[in-house]
Amino acid sequence: MSNTLTDRSFWSKYWESKKGLAFSVNRNYLFHQHLSAIVEKKQPAEAIELGGFPGYYAIFLKKHFHISSTLLDYFVHPGILQQVLQANGLTEGDIHVIEADLFNCSTPQQYDLVLSCGLIEHFNDTRDIIQRHVQFVKPGGTLFITLPNFRGVNGWFQKEFDLENYEKHNIASMDPDLLRSIAVELNLKDVKASYYGGFSVWLENKNSVSALTKLFMKSVWFAGKVITKTFRFESRALSPYIVLQATK
């Protein structure tokens, strides 16, 4: 899998170490405002989530909007996937699952809505990975990409307390201006790229850090939440996510 900062071994260990993966994806799931607006405006019939195992967004679209949904990922853990589907009242046949390398999909099927959440930052060549998304989008269809923002407070926590995970991310990709310029170069229309979310910090290795670190992180999290709830704004320093949306 060229151009990637991760491999199958990384993802196998990552997912098998996770707890509480099988939960019900509710109507207010993260980015629901964006996706609801896309569905209302564009009425997509078919959608694909790229690199999204265990498929929370494919499930969200199928469960709440009855959209024919596909999950494509380089690594799929069948046991975890089955548990997540069952937690949402779905069966294996309700979501089309493709376990494949995105770099080997030379003539992919095209969809009305193509999305990925937390994928493109794991690749060195940001333009290339976005272009591989675009090949799945039907003319007139929508591209929706989200990624974490590690160039602010949250990134500082990642770098200081979970360097191994931090180094699995292409920090340079976490730039709305860069993403916007790439989308324009790829001839996409109605391009929007911006920071999203008031404030949040997290650690993938939270259970392995010291009690003092957990207390420090909780204190910063609380202070940041108070500030951004009182004075809501998106920014590089505080927002936990970046969103790119465009039309082909």
Image: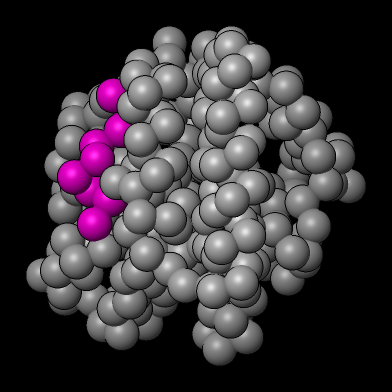
Q: Residue at x 24, y 37 (%)?
A: 170
User: Which of these two is toward me, 48 or 162?
Assistant: 162
Q: Residue at x 56, y 33 (%)?
A: 217
Q: Is residue 216 left or right of residue 239?
A: right
User: Which of these two is toward me, 194 or 136?
Assistant: 194
Identify the main secondary structure in magenta. loop
Residue 104 appears anywhere in the view: no
Q: Is residue 122 left or right of residue 222?
A: left
The magenta stretch is 166-175
Q: Is residue 244 above or below residue 22?
A: below
On the image, the x and y values in percent for residue 133 come to 32, 55
> In which quadrant is the N terminus drawn?
top left
On the image, the x and y values in percent for residue 12 come to 52, 15
Reply yes or no: does residue 172 show up in magenta. Answer: yes
Q: Furthest residue to the left?
A: 185
Q: Is residue 143 above or below residue 148?
A: below
Q: Is residue 33 above or below residue 174?
A: below
Q: Is residue 106 left or right of residue 39?
A: left
Q: Is residue 147 left or right of residue 2?
A: right
Q: Furthest residue to the bottom?
A: 41
> In which quadrant is the C terminus drawn?
bottom left
On the image, the x and y values in percent for residue 108 come to 35, 52
Q: Residue at x 73, y 71 (%)?
A: 65
User: Which of these two is toward me, 208 or 46?
Assistant: 208
